[in-house]
Image (cartoon, helix red, strand yellow):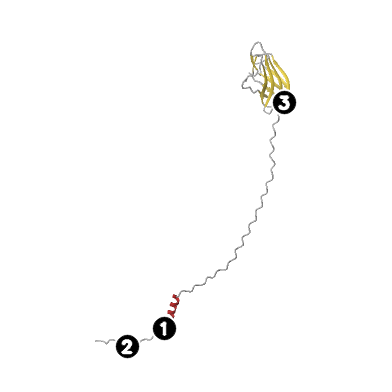
């Protein structure tokens, strides 16, 4: 069975509702508004803010008080000057030795005698005054031994010779000492022609 084709003109056009048309018009206006670029907003410059006042500088520290002047250290006491005394003492040994003591100097480290020593003997040509112990002895018995000369350690004398010079004894004499004893060749007899013994007492002033 064949049906006849519909005739488009037989159906009248359906009209759009008014509400729908209004909605479409509004949507078109909104689309147009979105497409237009927004007008640039004028930049408002911020008012210049006043610069902050500089912070007050901290007060300068008070200058440190100068240290009080310290007293200078006391200078060490000067070493006491040697005590000197003139003497005129003579001692003689039977072997032919004569010793004259002309002075004494008493220092802090040594005691020095000014002496003149002579030797005369017809039996021997030489003798020695410091072959055995030779020293100064004070009243307490303390001994100051002789410092032997490098070039004549035994103090050798030739017959007919006189030696003028100094005999040095190591050590100091006590300030209170009143006399010294000069001993040559301790323990030997005075007539020993090789090394005669001799003892001389030396009085001191101011003791």
Residue drawn at x 32%, y 88% is 9
Q: Which mark is residue 21?
A: 1
What percent of the width, then of the height, locates residue 125?
64, 13
Instruction: Work out how far the residue at label 3 is from the one at label 1, CA to CA, in angstroms.
Output: 150 Å
Of the residues under marks 3 and 1, which one precedes in the sequence? Answer: 1
User: Which residue occupies 68% across, 18% down?
Assistant: 117
Mark count: 3
Q: Is residue 178 left or right of residue 6?
A: right
Mark with earlier residue (3, 2):
2
Q: Secondary structure at mark 3?
A: strand
The CA distance from mark 1 to mark 2 is 24 Å
Q: Tell whether 14 sits left or right of 59.
A: left
Q: Is residue 18 left or right of residue 87?
A: left
The disc at residue 9 is 2
Residue 97, position in %: x, y?
A: 68, 15
Sort mark 2 into few (<14), some (14-19) or many (20+) by Cα contacts within 10 Å: few
Seen at 69% across and 20% down, the residue is 115
What residue is shown with label 3? 84
Residue 95 image point, x, y percent:
67, 13
Distance (Cα) linking label 3 and label 2:
170 Å
């Amino acid at each position: 069975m064949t049906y006849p084709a519909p005739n488009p003109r037989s159906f009248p056009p359906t009209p759009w509702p008014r509400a729908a048309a209004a909605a479409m018009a509004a949507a078109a206006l909104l689309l147009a508004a979105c497409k237009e670029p927004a007008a640039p907003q004028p930049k408002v410059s911020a008012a210049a803010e006043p610069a902050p006042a500089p912070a007050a500088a901290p007060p300068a520290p008070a200058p440190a008080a100068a240290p009080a002047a310290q007293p200078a250290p006391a200078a060490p006491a000067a070493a006491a000057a040697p005590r000197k005394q003139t003497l005129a003492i003579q001692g003689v040994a039977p072997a032919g030795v004569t010793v004259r003591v002309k002075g004494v100097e008493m220092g802090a480290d040594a005691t020095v005698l000014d002496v003149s020593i002579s030797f005369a003997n017809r039996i021997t040509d030489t003798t020695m005054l410091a072959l055995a112990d030779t020293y100064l002895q004070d009243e307490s018995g303390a001994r100051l031994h002789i410092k032997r000369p490098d070039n004549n350690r035994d103090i050798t004398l030739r017959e007919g010779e006189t030696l003028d010079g100094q005999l040095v004894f190591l050590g100091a004499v006590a300030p209170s000492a009143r006399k010294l004893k000069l001993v040559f060749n301790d323990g030997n007899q005075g007539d020993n022609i090789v090394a005669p013994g001799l003892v001389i007492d030396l009085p001191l002033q101011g003791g």
